[in-house]
Amino acid sequence: MKIAYICSDIDVQVFGHEGCSVHIRELTNALAEEGHEVFILCAWAGEARVPTRARVIEIQPEGGDAALWTLLEAEPLVQEHHLARDLRSVLWSYWLERRGAEILEEEKPDFIYERYALFGRGGLELGRRLGLPVILELNAPLCDQQAGYEKFTLMRTAAELEKNILERADAVIALSEWLEKWAIVRGSDPARVHLVPDGVSERVFAEAEDGASIRARHGLAGKRVVGFVGSFHWWHDVSTLLAAFAELHREDPDVRLLLVGDGETRKKVVKQTRAAGVEGAVVFAGKVPHEEVPRHIAAMDVAVVPYVPLEDFFFSPMKLFECMASGRPTVAASQGQVADVIEHGKNGWLYPAGDAIRLAEGLRGILGDRELAAMIGSAGRRHVLEGYTWRIAARRVVEIASERIASRRAMEAARHE
């Protein structure tokens, strides 16, 4: 099949290193590896150029549209009320409808696959205009998630559009069971909502990596290493991980904490390491390209996937799958999809979210039992590579799209009888 992938989120760069960027590239890579032709229409390609099997077409305003945007952005009223991001998102959908229609009419894809974004109605309009099924990928309850953010001003408009988009999509792919239920509450036809979790690339994680070079780089040779990899968002509970690590470090000054990534809470965590007196035992590796993630996880004796306690845990944690696929024994906060994926004590280890004492107990037990650690690591890797890969997700996407295409054709045939 030929697939048009649309990412209308103006804050997501296709060639970035954040999880959202990796998701876009790896799913489209997997679709291409399955023999399909894929091209991406996006609002922001990004400056870096990470190898990808899909063609990437960045759509930006030109001519009069570009001049209009410059004028709007400079308006004191727009600046005063933090309208710039919302207006840019709204206008991008219109730019997509015009420029995208030209591209799709020339490319003639079999269906449109769109990553849901605030105000992202362009893909649906293109689908209706060109008679193409639109598969909507739902990664988060975006309006709920953005509530209270001062730069999210047009909240009511976004919420109404969100409901309309979910009602009209030919199919909705929800990354977690929580999102599946949420989409139905927001108006999606239950028969058209499908659960397709995140995954890992078989290509990237095909071989178990050796973390010796990363250990040598950061002075970790011969040390027992607890590790985290992520984007330091507020929901990544690195503070609880740090508290648990401080307890372990008091018992064994040779244990180390390797933190890979960067983000909004990193400065806070740095201060906490000083307050806990463990700054000399914590290594901040910073943000690394995605292709280096497996080697960094391999440098850990145990990987941790920490989350703050959340009633609405909608995530499908990519880093959980990557830590497990690396063959590292993985300790994770027990909530949502995490608790569905991990069978405690067999392919991973669960602890109550936010509980530093229980997290320390789990880490202590795994670090102190090499046989248990090896068993959990091996079982976790096998579980993910057999059930949570991007190619498995890609096959499911195509299966869903094929069903919608066949349904449309049957309806067309019935109308002509």
Image: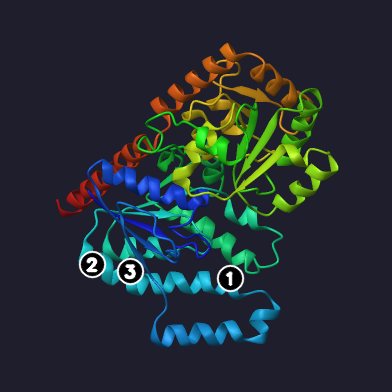
User: Which amino acid type corresponds to the residue marked 1 in the rendered image?
Assistant: Arg
Instruction: Decide if residue 237 is in sight here.
Output: no
Q: Is residue 58 above or below residue 61?
A: above
Q: Residues within 10 Å of mark 1 (few under 14, many from 20)?
A: some
Which numbered circle lies on residue 85?
A: 1
Residue that appears at 42% across and 64% down: 45
Q: Is residue 55 left or right of residue 281?
A: left
**What residue is shown with label 2?**
105
Q: Is residue 227 left or right of residue 40?
A: right
Pick the residue in front: 244 or 27.
244
Query: Which numbered disc flags the more N-terminal residue, 3 or 2?
Result: 3
Residue depth check, mark 2 versus mark 1: number of the one nearer the observer? 1
Q: Residues within 10 Å of mark 3 (few under 14, many from 20)?
A: many
Query: Which numbered disc flags the more N-terminal residue, 1 or 3?
Result: 1
Which numbered circle lies on residue 100?
A: 3
SS at circle 3: helix
SS at circle 2: helix
Q: Is residue 324 above or below residue 20?
A: above
